[in-house]
Amino acid sequence: MIRGILDFLRGGAQAPQPKQRQKLFFESGPDHIYAVGDVHGYDDTLGRLEELIVADGSKRDGTKWLVMLGDYVDRGPRSSAVLTRLTTRPLVGIRRVCLAGNHEAVMLDFLGNPSADHPWLRLGGLQTLSSYGLNTLPSNREEQRKLVRSLIPVAHVAFLESLPSMLQVPGFCFVHAGLKKGVAPADQTDADLLWLRPLATDGNAAINGFVTVHGHTPVSGVEIRPERINIDTGIYMSGVLSAVRLSRREPPEIIQSR
């Protein structure tokens, strides 16, 4: 998926599509699901939001999941700390599931093919490299590859590679970007799940039988529509990181941190 998009950005021909990411389908879901929008390297804000979510969850009976909707890296100052948090610091009483975003996909492409003119660097990759202590790239590509591999933990790379692109439970489908209209969830491609921008005119709730919960497209406030919920409030512009709680017997509730 990412190779074709990057070739398009560079003006070249589209390369063959790589293997698609895993999609998670559950016949039943938890009693409460917390979904968190695009983090973009703001680890301190994420930490405060997680504290609010754990406190909220402690007051509620039943099972609880936290679904992270991708874009953990780039633009903000502490991408490496975000990945460390997600790979080493589980939440008390809440199962965390992390999905892939387009920024994780582009970062992986850079790690496999580092270069000083890689598109990732213009999408916030420079800030991510800085969070690992790398502020200047060597001119030689092989030196770039060795330096990047020496600074970025193997566990972080493995985490980025393992992220699924979708999670679906009865009533809700969680993705980073959106779903292509008229395509069954199982047949959706990563190119759409990680990059698509939903249209204001889209209204598939009645057809799909579920609400799509996504990020990727920054909005000034959490959008809760009959067919979809957008919780990307553009933290790198607004300073606000948003989550929504979806409970079996209650309306959606917004939780935010700065």
Image (cartoon, grey):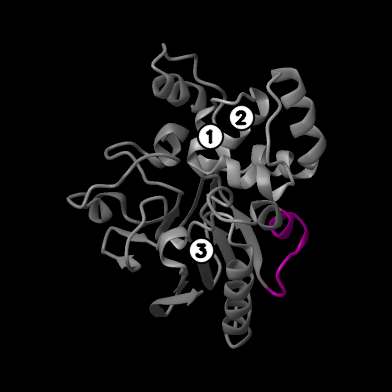
Point 32% across, 44% down: residue = 197
Point 54% across, 54% down: residue = 40
Using the numbered discs, state the Cα–Cα distance from disc 1 to disc 3 in whole angstroms. Answer: 23 Å
- Across and down, in percent, residue 16 comes to 49, 14
Q: Magenta segment range?
A: 84-93
Q: What crowding class fits label 3: few (fewer than 14 Cα within 10 Å), some (14-19), or many (20 or more)? A: many
C-beta proximity under 8 Å, tags 1 and 2: yes
Dot 3 falls on a residue whose secondary structure is strand
Give the residue at mark 1. 120
- Across and down, in percent, residue 119 comes to 50, 30
Q: What crowding class fits label 2: few (fewer than 14 Cα within 10 Å), some (14-19), or many (20 or more)? A: some
- Across and down, in percent, residue 106 comes to 54, 34
Give the residue at mark 2. 110
Q: Which of marks 1 and 2 is nearer the N terminus?
A: 2
- Vertical relation: 113 (above or below) 184: above
Residue farthest right in this picture: 150
**Amino acid at circle 2:** Phe
**Amino acid at circle 1:** Trp
Camera-side residue: 217 or 31? 217
Q: Earlier in the sequence, mark 1 or mark 3?
A: 3
Q: Which quarter of the picture shows residue 250?
A: bottom left
Left/right placement of residue 122 relative to residue 72 reads: left
**Amino acid at circle 3:** Val
Give the residue at mark 3. 36
